[in-house]
């Protein structure tokens, strides 16, 4: 079963809202979806140049409801990259901001329909007849579109993950949330899916959390659930997390990476004082995207844990020989099993024909362990291990330990050398001194490079790929 099959039962409840559209009820949303049905014919391939706007979100929901296949690309992606992706995938439809095609005359297309601030265009490509019947959407694994590689998610992947999320977060039609991450980002997509599926309300904001207008919208809309990645919460702590509080707020959720222990403690204490649930989660785009969650009641006693598997899934740890580890506190690779595990990767139109290659099992590439109570902990990435002077160092571990003593750095192995990137507010001598204390290595082990700003993806994660150009 696919998402959004039962939206009509929510009738006059508010589905979407924005400064441009005003409230859009579920009935009105369904009317718009039906209007688009003739244009978005079943199994059409749609290239959605996504932005945090009402038109973009409606187009996405309509594409799912009308059984199309949608490639979501961040609107900030370089035009030459977009042009290459369109050439590789040959979509019959493009959804984009109203003036996008006019600004980019190299794309040959015809405007078919307008959805508030978005338009749906017909390209010169014919509708593909060989797309796999299970495929639903394609998401990039990173915020920047360096290579045309996407994660293929099926209807079953999206539906099963949304159902699990709704269950463990107890999302009802009374909930209200707000977009504060890019809508093409897997965490934001899962929020849209779970909230619309449960008849809740989504306010679509173009503003960032660093803008005053965002907080005006947030307070005016009486938001009940707020979500973010580690960078979101780090910014909130700097801005003053007390500003986040309203009497309507009931739930905070965090995913998209590991939040450092000090920040986690501050968030938990804030939530405890304000009687707000804080639920941290772990996931990957390849798992549609959420895989584990840590219940609010366990947050303090299991601080730093990713919790346990979401409903109807399993996780375990394997050693280097792919054998399951049954003893607690033994480090190995985290392996996940569930109906939400992706179909495989895609680099061009031919890859959209293929059936699922993963059989519901995902080797995450994350290294970790479980404790005596069955709670899982992540310690790093398999490909984030470097050998220096015969010693193995975990780059994630080094970053985390430096962060605990108030130094924010980015570590990367480049040509078998240990590079450390840091911003101008720090002195290189202080960075080196503390690196040697933490790792026990000689200063000669590290290549320190000062940057004006550490590059980040659209979701706030360190963009390790772009660091290479500074080495």
Image (cartoon, rainbow, N blue to C red):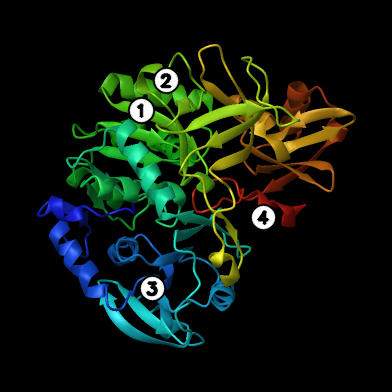
Q: Crowding near pointer 2: few (<14 within 10 Å), some, many (20+)?
A: many
Above or below, 310 relative to 88: above
Above or below, 133 relative to 179: below
Distance, label 3 to label 1, CA atoms, is 36 Å
Give the label on residue 278, or none: 1
**Residue 207 visible:** yes
Choose the circle earlier in sequence order: 2 or 1: 1
Q: Nearer the viewer, residue 385 or 404?
A: 385
Element type at mark 2 = loop
Choose the circle earlier in sequence order: 3 or 1: 3
Distance, label 4 to label 3, CA atoms, is 28 Å
Mark 2 against mark 4, which lies toward the viewer? 2
Choose the circle earlier in sequence order: 4 or 3: 3
Q: Crowding near pointer 4: few (<14 within 10 Å), some, many (20+)?
A: some
Element type at mark 4 = helix
Say which residue label 3 marks: 95
Q: Nearer the viewer, residue 116 or 377?
A: 377
Asked if disc 4 and disc 1 are in contact, CB closer than 8 Å, the reply is: no
Element type at mark 3 = strand
Element type at mark 1 = strand
Give the label on residue 466, or none: 4
Mark 4 against mark 3, which lies toward the viewer? 3
Residue 345 point in image, percent of width and height: 59, 57
Distance, label 2 to label 4, CA atoms, is 34 Å
Which residue occupies 40% across, 54% down? 155
Residue 357 point in image, percent of width and height: 59, 52
């Amino acid at each position: 079963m696919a998402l959004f099959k039962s939206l009509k039962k929510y009738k006059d409840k508010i589905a979407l809202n924005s400064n441009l559209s005003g409230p859009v009820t579920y009935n009105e949303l369904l009317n718009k979806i039906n209007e688009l049905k003739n244009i978005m014919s079943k199994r059409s391939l749609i290239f959605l140049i996504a932005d945090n706007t009402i038109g973009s979100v409606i187009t996405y929901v309509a594409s799912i409801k009308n059984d199309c296949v949608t490639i979501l690309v961040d609107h900030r992606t370089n035009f030459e990259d977009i042009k290459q992706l369109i050439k590789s995938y040959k979509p019959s439809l493009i959804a984009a901001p109203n003036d996008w095609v006019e600004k980019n005359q190299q794309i040959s297309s015809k405007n078919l329909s307008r959805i508030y601030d978005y338009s749906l265009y017909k390209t010169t490509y014919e509708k593909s007849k060989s797309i796999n019947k299970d495929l639903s959407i394609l998401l990039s694994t990173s915020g920047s579109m360096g290579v045309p590689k996407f994660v293929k998610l099926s209807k079953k992947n999206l539906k099963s993950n949304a159902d699990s999320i709704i269950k463990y977060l107890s999302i009802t039609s009374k909930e209200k949330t707000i977009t504060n991450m890019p809508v093409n980002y897997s965490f934001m997509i899962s929020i849209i899916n779970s909230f619309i599926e449960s008849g809740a309300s989504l306010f679509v904001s173009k503003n960032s959390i660093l803008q005053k207008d965002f907080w005006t919208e947030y307070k005016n809309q009486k938001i009940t659930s707020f979500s973010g990645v580690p960078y979101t919460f780090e910014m909130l702590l700097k801005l003053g997390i007390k500003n986040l509080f309203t009497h309507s707020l009931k739930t905070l959720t965090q995913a998209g990476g590991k939040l450092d222990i000090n920040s986690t403690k501050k968030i938990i204490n804030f939530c405890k004082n304000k009687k707000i649930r804080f639920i941290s989660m772990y996931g990957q785009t390849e798992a549609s995207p959420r895989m584990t969650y840590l219940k609010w009641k366990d947050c303090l006693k299991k601080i730093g844990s990713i919790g346990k598997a979401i409903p109807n899934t399993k996780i375990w740890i394997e050693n280097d020989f792919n054998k399951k580890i049954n003893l607690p506190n033994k480090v190995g690779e985290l392996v996940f099993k569930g109906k939400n595990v992706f179909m495989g990767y895609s680099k061009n139109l031919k890859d959209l024909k293929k059936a699922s290659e993963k059989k519901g099992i995902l080797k995450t590439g994350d290294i970790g362990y479980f404790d005596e109570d069955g709670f899982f902990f992540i310690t790093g990435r398999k490909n984030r291990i470097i050998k220096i002077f015969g010693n193995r160092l975990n780059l994630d571990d080094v970053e985390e330990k430096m962060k605990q003593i108030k130094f924010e750095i980015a570590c990367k192995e480049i040509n078998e050398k240990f590079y450390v990137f840091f911003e101008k507010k720090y002195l290189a001598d202080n960075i080196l001194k503390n690196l040697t204390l933490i790792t026990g290595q000689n200063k000669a082990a590290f290549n320190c490079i000062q940057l004006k700003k550490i590059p980040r993806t659209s979701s706030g994660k360190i963009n390790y790929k772009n660091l290479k150009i500074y080495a």
